[in-house]
Amino acid sequence: MHDLELVLQPYDNHVSEAVKTLRTNIQFSGQGIKVIMFTSSQPNEGKSVVSFASAGSFAEIGKKTLYIDADIRKSVFVRRMHPRARGGEIYGLSQYLSGQKELSECIYHTNKDNLDIILSGPTAPDPTELFEDETFSELIAYARQNYDMVVIDTAPLGSVIDAAIIARECDGAIFVVECGYVGRRFLQKTRDQLLRTGVRVLGVVLNKVSNHKGGYYGSYYYGDYEDHYLDDDR
Ligand SMILES: Nc1ncnc2c1ncn2[C@@H]1O[C@H](COP(=O)(O)OP(=O)(O)O)[C@@H](O)[C@H]1O
Ligand SMILES: [Mg+2]
């Protein structure tokens, strides 16, 4: 394990209620749920916010948690969380998957108890190919052995197939849906794409629901979102 520690700045708290419900439901989803991924149809629906908050929430209840930023194409993490490594350069997933760095050089402890992290690393020319490589399976095997929970933040399914490839290694997937942003058909199409990988879709976070004070929050629905979000004829 890397002896550097990343110091993360606090981000936002918009989704804490949804995340607590989500955590509870994941815990009741069965023993076999350890590696979970977060995806969505489109960028900006809130995958990173919700997945990172979820990882933090597992860590808070004492689960040894690994957060993997696997949206190599668009990582906002470094800009948003301002991670600082004590005494060194920060390496990430793209460098591990392309063989430039050892896994041990890319996993960081954080200033949050029980939370370790792998950042995305610099943008790579062909991330899809990197996820198909067996180094990715080896990473997941390592994570399964060494952590209680593994949370993977992925690219949106509507644009690239990275998330569908990642899904093959996961026990469950959470779909993040920004309220009123993506049309019904497109949502169904990307949902079907995810289901075809064989991954269990554990539920949906309906995100950026506006509240009466003019703010936004996220809410969590267990099960498929067909029942909750898609009834109206959008
Ligand atoms: N529940 C929420 N309330 C308000 N803003 C949110 C919420 N969830 C996400 N955001 C904002 O939406 C933007 C996109 O979120 P992000 O997690 O980066 O999306 P993605 O990872 O799906 O591209 C960010 O500016 C984030 O702060
Ligand atoms: Mg993101």
Image (spheres, rainbow, N blue to C red):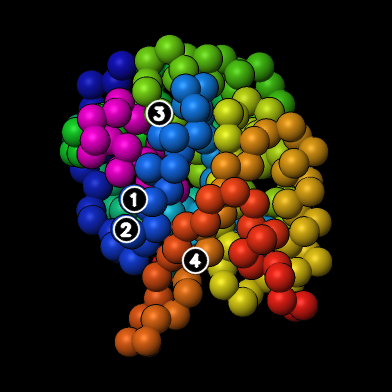
Q: Is residue 197 left or right of residue 83?
A: right
Q: Residue at x 29, y 28 (%)?
A: 63
Q: Residue at x 23, y 53 (%)?
A: 9
Q: Does the magenta portion include 65? A: yes
Name which quarter of the figure residue 50 lies in. bottom left
Describe the element under mark 1 as helix, strand or loop. Answer: helix
At which x and y percent is residue 150?
A: 44, 30
Instruction: Check disc 1 and report the residue beneath it.
Output: 20
Q: CA distance from mark 4 to mark 2?
A: 11 Å
Q: CA distance from mark 2 to mark 3?
A: 18 Å
The three-letter amino acid code for the residue at tag 3 is: Met
Q: Residue at x 80, y 56 (%)?
A: 189
Are the residues tagged 4 and 2 within 8 Å (C-beta)? no
Which range of residues does the magenta coloring cover? Answer: 51-71
Q: CA distance from mark 4 to mark 3?
A: 23 Å
Instruction: Check disc 3 and report the residue beneath it.
Output: 149
Q: Is mark 1 within 8 Å of ligand 1?
A: no
Instruction: Check disc 2 and report the residue beneath it.
Output: 16
Where 35 falls versus 39 (above or below)? Answer: above
The three-letter amino acid code for the residue at tag 4 is: Asn
Q: Residue at x 61, y 19 (%)?
A: 137
Are the residues tagged 3 and 1 within 8 Å (C-beta)? no
Where 162 falls versus 12 (above or below)? Answer: above
